[in-house]
Amino acid sequence: MDQQQLPDSQTSTTDGTTTSCNHKNGNSKNLNRREDYHNLSHAYSTYLSHDTQEQIHWEDVCRSYRQYATFAMAQWANHQYRLHSLTEEQRRYLPNALKRETSEFQHRSKLYKDAAIRNQFCLDCILRHAGQANSQDFLAAVNNRSRQKNSGGQMAIEHSTDSQMSKVSSVLKSLARDWSAEGKAERDMAYGPILSLVQQYLPSVPTMHQQLKSQSNSSTRQSKTPKPGLPDTPRICVPGAGVGRLACELAAKGYAVQGNEFSLYMLLSSDFILNGGLATPEHPLQISPYLLESRNVHAHMDPVRP
């Protein structure tokens, strides 16, 4: 699904009067020096170098991002193993797209691999923005260390858990809901009432200016008293900000917004979307957010379509 951002004049940032995100978990050491990366990340500014648990959690999250494609292809291989374990009589009833010897299967396999690569590229962009090693950096570092050791064996690699990969998948689905054109209908139902009520009970500064101007034009009474000063910008905190769309919408309407998020998985992605400047309407990122889903799949193309 194509990513969709607000216009540049409405894009929220994480300083001052727009939006910022906080989390309760932190960072870990990079595989390479942090200054080797293009780092504009506000998420990394919460780095707690003295907290071991924060460092471990940060690396767990980054590892999950890096290993998404590996996990997706392992899940594909597991599905194929189950099908191959069927008896010859049972396999006769499978559609051609599930039979390994058919061209339909090869086409389906290519679509799946392409979708995994698309999603991994998006996650690598998020890691790059945060100043962290992405999947390609990690692979290069592992190969380099293996050559230096010249041990003849491969280095042991710690793999992410199913629970951690589920959170990465949730990030992709949240990005599709909050920042894609296809997610507009759901956003309108979820965020529309909130935005309407906020503007009703806490008018933004532009709305206040319009009200004051209207009152001034309709008044025929001459007054020599000085006009009152303009009201301060209303401040709003968005708890559980996720990937930042609601906070961004509020900031675009003139509010001073702080998006507060506990999950580092969501924080990294929202920081990239709001401040990375890479995913734009002119150059959208394409993702297949439902690639790992096995429920509510109505057609075989649903999980792999961009």
Image (cartoon, helix red, strand yellow):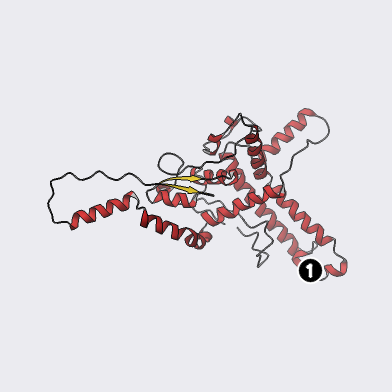
Q: Is residue 260 left or right of residue 289?
A: left
Number of marks in the rendered image: 1
Where residue 57 sits in the image (x, y, percent)? 65, 39
Of helix, strand and loop, which one carries label 1? loop
The residue lying at 62 percent from left, 31 percent from top is: 51
Front residue of 141/85: it is 85
Q: Give the amino acid at mark 1.
A: Leu
Residue 36 appears in which quarter of the rendering? top right
The residue lying at 28 percent from left, 51 percent from top is: 209
How packed is label 1: few (under 14 Cα within 10 Å), some, or many (20 or more)?
A: few
Where residue 64 sits in the image (x, y, percent)? 67, 44
Where residue 177 sits in the image (x, y, percent)? 54, 57
Residue 281 visible in the picture: no
In the displayed structure, 298 sits above or below 117; it is below
The residue lying at 74 percent from left, 35 percent from top is: 143
Q: Which residue is mark 1?
A: 94
Front residue of 62/231: it is 231
Quadrant housing the N terminus: bottom right
In the displayed structure, 272 sits above or below 210; it is above
Residue 77 visible in the picture: yes
Q: Is residue 15 left or right of residue 144?
A: left
Quadrant housing the C terminus: bottom right
In the displayed structure, 23 sits above or below 289; it is above
Front residue of 143/43: it is 43
The residue lying at 60 percent from left, 41 percent from top is: 127
